Each structure stands twice: as structure tokens, then as C-alpha cells.
Amino acid sequence: MSVTARVHTGALRAKGTASARSTTATRSSAPARTVTRPGTTRRTGPVHVRPQLRLVTEPVGTPPRVRRTTRTRPRRTPFVLLMVGLIAATALVLLALNTAMAVDSLRASEQRAANTELSQAVERLEQQVTTARTPAQLAAAAAAAGLVPAGTAGHLVIGPDGTSVVRGAPEPAPAPEPAPEPAPAATQQPAAQPDQQPSADAAAPGTTTEQAGG
Amino acid sequence: MPHRPTDPTRRPVRTTPPRRTSTEALRPRRAPGTRRTRGLSPTVRTRRNRWGLGVLVVLLVAVATKLVVLQGIDGTAYAQAAESDRMRVFDIAAIRGAVLDRDGNPLAYTVEASKVVADPTVVEDPDRTALALTTLLGVPVDQLTDDLTASGRYSVLAEHVDTATSDQITALELPGIVLEDQPTRLYPAGTVGGQVVGFIGRDGDGLAGIEQRYDDQLSGTDGTRRVEVGAGGIPIPSGIDESTPAVDGSDVTLTIDEDLQYTVQQRLATECSNGQTTRGSAVVMEAHTGRVVAMATCPGYDPSQASTTDPDLLGNPAISDVFEPGSVMKAVTLSAAIEDGHATPDTVLSVNGHIPAGDVVVTDAHDHAPVDWTVTGILAKSSNVGTIMLAREVGDARLEQYMRAFGLGSTTGIELPGESAGILQDSADWTASRAANVPIGQGVSVTALQMASVYQTIANGGVRIPPRIVESTTAPDGTVTPEPQPEGTRVISESTAQQMAYMLEAVVGPGGTAPLGEVPGFRVAGKTGTAQRANPECGCYSGGGYFTTFVGFAPADDPQYVIAVDLERPNSDAEGGQVAAPVFADLMQYVLAADDVVPSGSPRPDFQLTGTAPTN
């Protein structure tokens, strides 16, 4: 086994060197081959062998190799730089976008909260208005202001000839109950009160005529 | 290599002496080709390889299968489980729609409010927390402390807390105090229109009135919001944020006029507080449209206090309680007589003071010798005997037909729950006494609304329009859907209706039963009614008092409004013309003035109440 192994390795080495030489030889030492080989096939060999070797190696194999190596090497750097730049830019833009989104969402939730607060304020105010506008509140406010419910209404109807007719049976409204001494009215109109209070009892007929016509 | 290794498992590499040459590093340490020459026979190695391959394939298949199972089959479930871990779902409560009067004034609406809840296990200092909350919530400190130290993890401190207060509570940042959304229903007008609007229960379902009937439209649909949250429950900005918006409820606009409703209720409240009237109802209706502009019964109730109100009061007696209408029914009987050609307003009848009917004798209010009254006179004087004489000419079956055409004995179809149909027996079942009682409004029961509807028919030229109380519904997006307008049905001819209006005007005229029903400046048509009230103690009429009613419309020559007033007076023998007519007049005066109705100015005709009976 060991013997054959040795032989084998020797052959492999020989092959390796031979092939290495032959590949280098193809370019430069084409004549050398023609010299060595004719020893065996002198007459017929050279004519057929030469053109075959040349056709395979020179025009097809070499020129593209030369071009690739010389041209691509200097251009690789900008490409890599471009890629790195793009990646870095993407990362930065993503970061910026994320930040912007976070900021926006924060602002949105802030504004939502503000919105809710405002709508609640509106709701509260509307509630006050609604409560103050109920018939019971209005009636109380009217009574406090000294108003009385109107009786029947009179309507002045103007005919085509310009004459007017009173329709209905208008009556003077009754005097507001002199119930006064009302505490709310006194607190609301402190300045006018001293003048009005004595007349509240005495001048009831006067107020009646003033309020007639409802 | 003198000794060839006999053991096939021995590594040949070790037997090879190391080479110490300059190119040693480049040379394989193992002798070339030794790998293939290991001491296993090719068959064994192949088998082992196969086994190894098999094991690897099985493992890979197992891994791949698990992957497929994880990703393909169970994938959705796991993804959902993972997602649900990150997702928070918030309910968005739909705001219940408002109930509005015809001018858009809210009778019921919902505002945001909160329920203040404590988790006693989280509350750090119950005493300090109670002190901080007591003034805000208006709850005594002792009670708050009890609630804050209660067992369990959920203790309600206060309900229906308004937004201003809840903001202050939030600002205090008390540990363990949580605010929950709790929309609150407000009835700003209180008792005004309460019986019509109804109320809602604790769970927000309508339990009476419009709140019940229009619950579907008012309640809307709750929405949800699903948000992907990160640590601490803060929503992830770019995460999932799906929300199904809540659809708020629709607003319901009534035909009720809030001011008029208030006036009606004030007037009835005055009546109910006089000690004689235990219950009084009034219905105000537009003559030409059948729209109910006010409907009330005293005593009423405040929907916001419904949970603490006597359940007997939580109804709408104007449509659910029936009463015997008495003489107001005579308008139906006389309409039938005139429509069928048995009489005209000027037909003269010799009316005795009493008339036998089966086993009873029906008398007029005061028995009298025979008098020659016109049909107008019979109505103006409210003669029972004259009416029964005319009813007998009409015939029982035909009279029942007219009564049903006027809407008696069946529900009116108004958009309110709990309406009563009243009681009207088939004429085939009428006994002789019943046949004499029904034409004068005894032995037949109606609601106040049905009575108003009868007079609406006469006021509207004989066309009955079923009463209704809902004008339209307004969706949250502003679309207004009007309630379908019911078709009118002709009950009596226009000329009959005019003759009836003429005769009803005589009732409030000189010699009529209800001069107190007059409205200054206007011509009023109407009819009094005084029906015996069944005494609940004995089931008989004696000692039961009376139902006094007045139903009418104005102006008589161009009717605009119909008002029915019905007062239950168990301890009084006053007649409708004395107690119900003034209520009618006050209400009619207000509604005509409020609506700017201009009187025509034509004088009230002179009525021929008596005449000379034809001798036959």
C-alpha cells in the first residue's frame, strides 16, 4: 500500500508541475512544444496541432480576463460606498420617521385630550343653558321680573281699504301680585329698590295700565 | 512501512511518520487518501450512512412538520394569542339620543358622567382619601371610609358624577380610585312632559313612554377600540389601532310644545290641588293634523326621580286609563243621527224628562215635563232623553258602527306604549238598558285621547286623523326621517261636521250647559260631560262621584285646536260645565294666544234651542 501510495503521490506531483508548466507554456513557448512533440510525430503532427492550440487559447481565453481585472477593481469602492451610504441613510430616515411618528402620536393624544376637555366644557355650558331655558325656570324668572301671564290677545286686522278692525277681546293683564318684598328682586337691583318699594303697594293700579295690551 | 496495520480500525495516519520538510505546513497531516481507506467495509459504511441519513431525514421532517404545524395550522391561534396579549380593547359608549319638543327644546338628553369606583386593596390611606373626596362627591366621610375599606376589589363610591368633578378627582391622583364612564340621562324640564317622555332603567333601557317605544332608535350601538399597547399599557404609535366607532342614538322630535305642556300641567296641578279632583287629564291636539301638542295628567312624575316614585304614578293615564265619558259622547250619537238623515239641527222633538229603557228609567239631569227642543237644544241642554230618542232612530248596530269609525273601542295607534283601547261592547250584546246608556256615554269607556280624537274628527270636517305624538327622528348624521303621516278616514260628511260644530257652539252659548267654556274673543264649540264614576268599594255607581269632562275646539268657524279635559272627582257632584269647562277655557285661551290664532270676527249665531214639535 505504502509503495503504491508513494508512486501515486509522485505521479500527482509530476502531473501538477507538468500541467502548471504546460498552462504557462501555452502563451509564451509555443515553439518549444513544436520542438518536443515532432520527435514522435514529426511528419503529420505539426500541421494539425498548431492551429488547434492557437484557436482555443488566444482569442477566446485571454482578452476578457484582462479587461475584467483591469476595469472592475477601481470601480468596486464607490459602489460599496454607495451601498453603505444608502444603508446609513435608510437607517437615519427610518429613525427620523419613527421619531416623527412618536412625536405626532404624542401630540395627537394631547390634542385628543384637549378636544375632550373642550367638548366637555361645551357640554357643561349647554347644560346650563338648557336648564335655564326650561319653562319652569323661565316662568320663575318672568315672575321675578314682575311679568304676568297675558290674557287674551287682541289682533288689529287691516282691511283692503286701509281701515282697521280690532279682533279678539284684549284685556289689561292683571297686576302682578304685590306679594313683593321679594328677596331676590331686592338683591338684584339694590340701587333702584328704595324708589320702587313704596310704590309697589300704593301704585298697583298704575302698573296695571302700563302692562295692558297683552 | 514494514508493518501493515492488521487492525482495520487503526488509523493509518498515525502509522505514517511525520515529515519534517520545509513545505510541511502545506501538506495535509493525514496521508492523502486515508479517508477513503478507513477500516470500514463499504457495505457497513453504506448502511451506516443510510441509517444516518434516515435519522437526519426523520429529524428534519420532524422539524419541518413542527414548523408547518406551528406556522400553518396553529399559526393563527398563536398569532392571535400573542396579539391579544398586546391588544387592549376599550368600549366606546354610544350616546343615547335626545327627546326634543317640536321646537327642539330637549325634554330628555344624555351627558357624559362618571361612576367613581375604588379598589380597596390598592387604596393606601382610606381616611385621607375619604377626606379628599367627601366634598367633591358630597358623600359623608364615614360612608366613604366604609366603602374604601370594604372587602373585595370593587366598591362604588358615587354615581353620575359630572365631568367637572371627575376632572378634579383625576387631578388628585389618588391610588385605587378609578373613574368609569357612566352616561347620565337628564330630564331638564322635570315633570313637564314626563309621562310622555318616560324614563330609563339602571341599565339604560327605556321603561316607559317614548324612551321605551323608541328605545331602538334612541339607544344607538356601542363601539369598540382595539389598540396595540406596549409596556405600561401605552399605545404603540405604529401599532394596530382599529376602532369600530360607536353609532350614537337618533334624536326623537315630538309634536309636544314644551311651553304649552308646562301650562297644561300647571293648570291641571292647580285643579289637582283643590282637594276635590284626584286625577285630571288633558290632551291638546291640532285640529287638522291630529298632532298632540300637549298631553298630561295630574299628578305627574319627574322621570329623573322615577326610581323613587310611587309605581302607580309611573304611567300615562291620558292614554292608558279609561273612564265613562258621559255626555261628551252625545256628539257621536247626534253625528250619526244627522249623517243618516234622521235629524237636522233644527228638527224639533218633544222631549220628556225621563224615558224607560229596559229595566231602568233614564232621566235627564233634572226631570221635567215634556219640552219641545230642537236637536241643537237637546245638545245644548245635554238632554239624555232626547239623545236616546235619536239613538233609537239610528239603531244600535249603526250607532256602534259610527262609534268604531270615530275610533272608540280600539287603540288610536299613537306612538306610546301602554295605550288602552277602551271598552265598547258589540251592539249585539247590548241589553235594553245598555242600549240606552251607550248613546249618552255610560257603559262605554274611553281614554282622554280617544275623546279628543272624536272631536278632532268633527273639527276637521269629518275626516279623522289618528293622533300621533312623534314628528320625526333625526339620525346622528343629521338625516331627518319624518314619522309616517297616518291617512285620514272620513267618518261623517263635511256638512254633518259643520252642523255638529254649529250645535256644539250652542253648548257654550246662552242657555247651554257650559258658558264657562267660553274664550273671550273666540267662538268655541264643545260639550260637557258628567258621568257617574263607579265606586270601587261597592262596584256600583252610588257614592262614586263623577268624571267631569269637557271636550271642544276653537275657533268654531275655523277649528285650530281640540282640547279634551277630564277630571275625576270622587267626592263631588259638580258638573262638567262647572269644573272642567273653566280648565278647558284657560287652556284654549293660552294655546290660541300662543299660536297667534286670529279670530274671524264673525258673531256667534243665534241658536234655536226650543221649537214647536210637529203634532202627529
Image (tube, coloured by chain):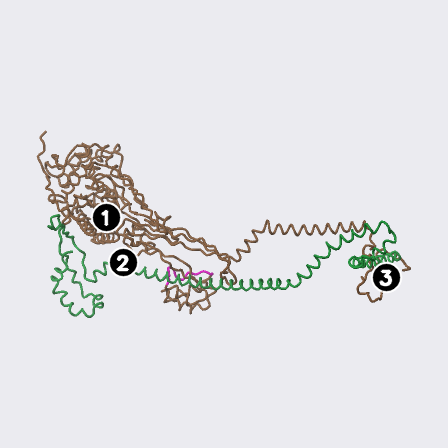
Q: Is residue B421 magenta?
A: no
What residue is disc 1 on? B282
The residue sitting at the top extreme is B616
Which secondary structure lies at badge 1? Answer: strand
Q: Quadrant of residue B421?
A: top left
Q: CA distance from mark 3 to mark 1?
A: 126 Å
Residue B16: image tag: 3
Q: CA distance from mark 1 to mark 2?
A: 24 Å
Which secondary structure lies at badge 3? Answer: loop
**What is the chain letter for disc 1?**
B
What type is the residue that disc 3 sits on?
Answer: Thr
Q: CA distance from mark 2 to mark 3?
A: 114 Å
- In green, which chain? A
What type is the residue that disc 2 sits on?
Answer: Arg
Q: Residues within 10 Å of mark 1 (few under 14, many from 20)?
A: many
Residue A133: image tag: 2
Marks 3 and 1 on same chain = yes
What residue sits 23% from the left and 58% below the top?
Answer: A139
Residue nearer the viewer, B570 or B575:
B575
Q: Position of residue B79 (x, y in %)?
A: 56, 54
Q: Earlier in the sequence, mark 3 or mark 1?
A: 3
Drawn side of residue B556 relative to residue B49, left or right: left
Which quadrant holds the C terminus of chain B? Answer: top left
